[in-house]
Amino acid sequence: MQWTELVVFSALFLLVTVLGFVAAKWRAGDTLDHLDEWGLGGRKFGSWITWFLVGGDLYTAYTFVAVPALVFGAGATGFFALPYTVILYPLVFLPLVRMWSVSRVHGYVTPADFVRGRYGSHWLALIVAITGIVATMPYIALQLVGLEAVLRTMGLNGSGIAGHAPLLIAFLILALYTYQSGLRAPALIAFVKDTLIYIVILVAVIYLPSKFGGWGAIFDTAQAKYDATPAKTDGILLSGGNQLQYATLALGSALALFLYPHSLTGILASRGRNVIRRNMVALPAYSLLLGLLAMLGFVAISAGVTPITNQATGRPDTNTIVPVLFGEQFPSWFAGIAFAAIGIGALVPAAIMSIAAANLWTRNIYKEYLKKSATPAQEAKQAKLASLVVKFGAVAFIVFIDPQFSIDLQLIGGVMILQTLPAVAIALYTRWFHVYGLVAGWVVGMGWGMALLYGIPSADGKRPYFGGSALALDELSLLGWHPFAGATVQIYVGIVAVIANLVVAVVVTLVAKQLRVFNGTDQTNADDYHVDEDSHRVKPVAAH
């Protein structure tokens, strides 16, 4: 047991737990018994709060644990996260303000609400809602994996079910304050989380390289390690075999990120269009942080870091790379602060994600199919309970899938959520697609994407299914035809699946239009997409 680290970690964890419960009173509206208040923080967050909230939402344990672990194991491929965040903000600068405007006019809380209004189809909205919920669960699981890695590094590393006990305790604390305070809890805690993260990373990238002879020596050591492995695609530079995977992974991840319901939750909680614009300009500051973090994977190689063996599975836990590096190289008290930063960095997005998934369940399944007459208070109660259930689903992902690299959890979710691109993102600009085309495209894209993921073994060969998201082009089959037979170049499954989705959607749309099949009723109009906070057309917050 690392007692000093554990005491510091526990003290900071206690601080954010208290903040989580106190947040119910912070900037409170008339009631928390409404999704506008519980699930969207009253829709009144300004630029600073939104910056911390969305940053805390997007830069998660995925950033602090999974990306450096991937760089440690596979090298340059792990840096795909850097160009993906660089191209992300210009891509979503305009669509997000359109989504904010139309949501404020009609009172939409979820992306499926928008689809329901845009196409007048509850079935299409149901598909989008279910996809959002299922895709979010592995992403929450990734946060819990990051938290578990920190706990394991401090000595809380039991075998069997006991190995997951500390995680379950942290999960219960998270569940309770999310239930109590809604979106205000992660919004308030994000201030603490981001402050700790910036301090720890700036210290790490200045202090640690000086201990190992500077960055030049660190890169040389890393390349020597990769040269000694049998894999042909690892190294501090990309190889011919993984350049396409790198590019498609960056593009696919960028297209997927703001399709996730939790990303839109942070945006819809903003006060106005200018708040969103300022944030899209300022948020790339986090990309600098991400690049520095990724390089800690190389530092860990120079430090000779060995992953801690997970006593629950008997296998090395690659997610402990950065926590072990911090524990070995920093003074105990500062390592405790670093562990707290990573742990809190997992809790903030996990809370937002569970709230977003709960909103989807409540608005687009419970109210649509189970209780159409539900009052706002009943909706809020349902959402609170659903947020607990979603977290249980995330824990199940950890226990039953147990990926070699925790980043695979996020990438599997990315393949799923990408299939909502035509129905959500493209629909913000055009209603050209037919509802039948969107549904058919989703079925093909989701089905093929999951089938391809199922057939990919893990890099260590220990798991034959769902072992990653990189597909060799040689394995790509179109009804038995292999157009790229013999090619060893890899591609991100999500891009393959969403291309199939779009092709089918276009073909079915053309056929449906030729047959003049009814395409639902659009409840929005062109002006709805340009309304700002001072317009009389904005629906009042928490209106019944």
Image: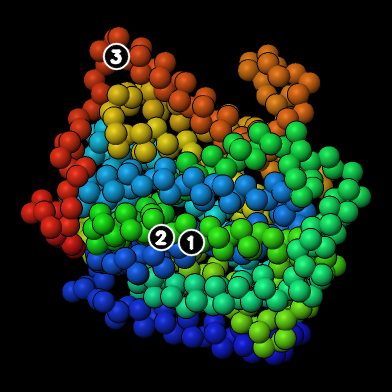
Give the amino acid at mark 1: Ala
Q: Residues within 10 Å of mark 3 (few under 14, many from 20)?
A: some
Helix or strand or loop: what does disc 1 sit on? helix
For marks 3 and 2, give the CA distance: 43 Å
Helix or strand or loop: what does disc 3 sit on? helix
Going from the N terminus, do you reach mark 3 or mark 2 first?
Answer: 2
Q: Which residue is mark 1?
A: 285
Q: Nearer the viewer, residue 481 or 163?
A: 481
Q: Residue at x 48, y 68 (%)?
A: 348
Q: Nearer the viewer, mark 3 or mark 2?
A: 2
Left or right: residue 223 versus residue 126 is right
Q: Tell me the tag on residue 282.
A: 2
Q: How many marks?
A: 3
Left or right: residue 102 versus residue 64 is left
Q: Which residue is mark 3?
A: 513
Give the amino acid at mark 2: Ala
